[in-house]
């Protein structure tokens, strides 16, 4: 195989790779509510298997879209939420721990924060006295 063909194949593979994009607070707008993302403790992102990226400012906006069937959940390569304890950092939504409390002030009033582990969850939930939710339970909150 000639080197030119190999280079083109490698470039196409790199260009077509599906990956999340960092949320740009103060720049990106929520796909659902169109508000500018402002609070880096909250946010979510869906990435399709074809590489289309949808950004959200709050879990309820993401879940409204998720349940709309505009994109089938089977077509999603990534379902990501922001880790409250590490602002701006994505964690896989299915593996996150969630706290729900009226004391959690979120961009669109979901009252839900996501955490990567139980230690972080417990650190914040002492003050919030919220309830623990799994990914499945979070999904049912906004159906």
Image (spheres, rainbow, N blue to C red):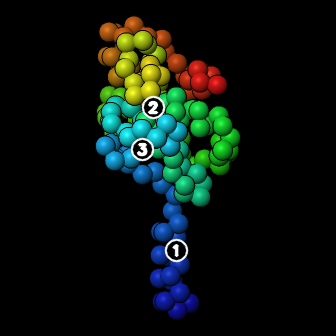
Q: Residue at x 65, y 34 (%)?
A: 67
Sequence order check, earlier mark of 2 and 3: 3
Considering only vertical position in the picture, is 17 above or below 106? Answer: below
Q: Residue at x 43, y 13 (%)?
A: 101
Q: Quadrant of residue 52?
A: bottom right
Q: Nearer the viewer, mark 2 or mark 3?
A: 3
Q: Residues within 10 Å of mark 1 (few under 14, many from 20)?
A: few
Give the SS element for disc 3.
loop
**7 sits to left or right of 64:** left
* Residue 24: % across, % down: 34, 47
- Residue at the extreme bottom of the image, as rendered: 2
* Residue 69: % across, % down: 68, 40
Rounded to the nearest whole Å, what is the CA distance between mark 2 and mark 1? 34 Å
**7 sits to left or right of 105:** right
Rounded to the nearest whole Å, what is the CA distance between mark 2 and mark 3? 11 Å
Q: Quadrant of residue 70?
A: top right
Q: Residues within 10 Å of mark 2 (few under 14, many from 20)?
A: many
Rounded to the nearest whole Å, what is the CA distance between mark 1 and mark 3? 29 Å
What mark, if any, has residue 12 been given in the picture? Answer: 1
- Residue at the extreme front of the image, as rendered: 34
* Residue 60: % across, % down: 52, 28
Q: Residue at x 59, y 32 (%)?
A: 64
Q: Residue 98, can we see it?
A: no
Q: Image quadrant for the N terminus?
A: bottom right
Residue corresponding to mark 3 = 29
């Amino acid at each position: 195989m000639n080197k030119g063909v190999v280079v083109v194949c490698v470039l196409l593979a790199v260009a077509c790779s599906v990956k999340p994009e960092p949320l740009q607070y103060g720049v990106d707008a929520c796909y659902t509510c169109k508000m500018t993302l402002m609070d880096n403790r909250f946010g979510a992102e869906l990435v399709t298997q074809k590489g289309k990226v949808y950004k959200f400012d709050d879990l309820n906006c993401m879940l409204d879209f998720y349940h709309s069937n505009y994109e089938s959940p089977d077509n999603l390569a990534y379902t990501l939420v922001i880790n409250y304890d590490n602002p701006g950092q994505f964690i896989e939504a299915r593996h996150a721990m969630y706290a729900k409390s009226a004391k959690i002030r979120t961009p669109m009033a979901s009252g839900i924060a996501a955490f990567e582990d139980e230690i972080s969850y417990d650190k914040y939930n002492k003050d919030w006295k919220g309830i623990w939710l799994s990914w499945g339970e979070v999904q049912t909150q906004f159906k």
